[in-house]
Amino acid sequence: MRVSRAAANLDEGLKAWRERPLGEVPYLFLDARYEKVRMEGKIVVCAVLIAVGIESSGKRRVLGCDIATSEAEINWRRFLEGLLARGLKGVKLIVADDHAGLKAARRAVWPSVPWQRCQFHLQQNAGQFVTRQEARKTVAAQLRTIFNAPDRMEAERLLKTALDAWRKEHPKLADWAEESIPESLTVFDFPAAHRIRLRTTNGLERINRELRRRTRVASIFPNPDSCLRLVSALLAELDDDWMTGKVYLNFNL
């Protein structure tokens, strides 16, 4: 009885945390990870949707999390609309990977907000279009040069030069890169001092690694509620650390 009462109290507190009011968040980061959950007698791989933001105060915050059966548009859209319903406003940039469901939901909920495609994942994706190992290192170096350019004009010049070379040596890479890489250059439209924090979803990747370290003990969750309970508790703890910690990004430039 005491255990059930304690679990109920914990769930109530975590639900309140997940539904707390939000405010102005200029930079929004979105990602998902997967956990095995038992549902209706079957083991299902569920998506854990996570939103992290940088508030106008410069502090990082965990804005929300949810468990969904997949990263389909309908699930991401419901999650994003939930953030809006809680008062999220002032979003100037969304940083995320190139996932079809998330992309469609993002366009539906924030059609005019720019999107920064994660440069880290994009660089990883480029490798599949290059067969030779030594050539992959060269391409990776070229991409880093583009991403580290001092401004958009120089990044676009370097990209054009790279595309000219890739069309001869790696035509499939050139076709993919011509469309994909510009999606990762949006960050050049924002203050130079902010760019290093906005180029990738690596911050979320670190969160996911910590979640993986803590959730792998469970292996398979008995139900979605138990998964949401543990993930929420870990993220709420992290959010509290961030809220009381140092400023992550200086908006007083």
Image: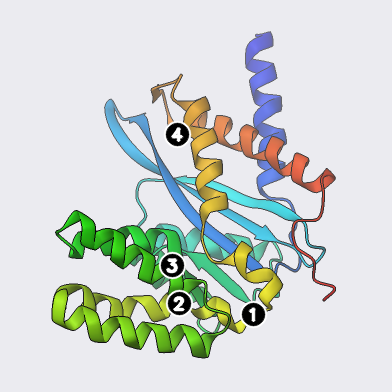
Mark 4 or mark 3: whose residue is earlier in sequence = 3
Q: Secondary structure at mark 4?
A: helix
Q: Does the image show residue 102?
A: yes
**Amino acid type, mark 4:** Pro
- CA gap between label 3 and label 2 equals 28 Å
- Above/below status of 3 relative to 27: above
Question: Which three-letter amino acid code belongs to the residue tagged 3?
Answer: Arg
Residue tagged 4: 224
The alpha-carbon separation of the residues under discs 2 and 1 comes to 20 Å
> Where 18 sits versus 199, above or below?
above
Task: Mark 1 vs mark 4: give the one in front.
Answer: 1
What quarter of the picture does the C terminus occupy?
A: bottom right
Task: Looking at the image, tell me whether mark 1 or mark 4 is earlier in sequence order.
Answer: 1
Q: Mark on residue 190?
A: 1
Residue of label 2: 107
Could you say where residue 134 lies in the image, as x and y percent from the top left? 22, 57
| Residue type pointed to by label 1 | Phe
Does 195 appear above or below 151?
above
Q: Name the residue located 45 percent from the left edge and 77 percent from the top edge.
A: 107
**Camera-side residue of 103 and 19:** 103
The quarter of the picture where residue 125 lies is bottom left
Q: Could you classify mark 4 by the number of other residues whose Cα lies within 10 Å: few (under 14), some (14-19), or many (20 or more)? A: some
Mark 1 or mark 3: name the one nearer the start of the chain: 3
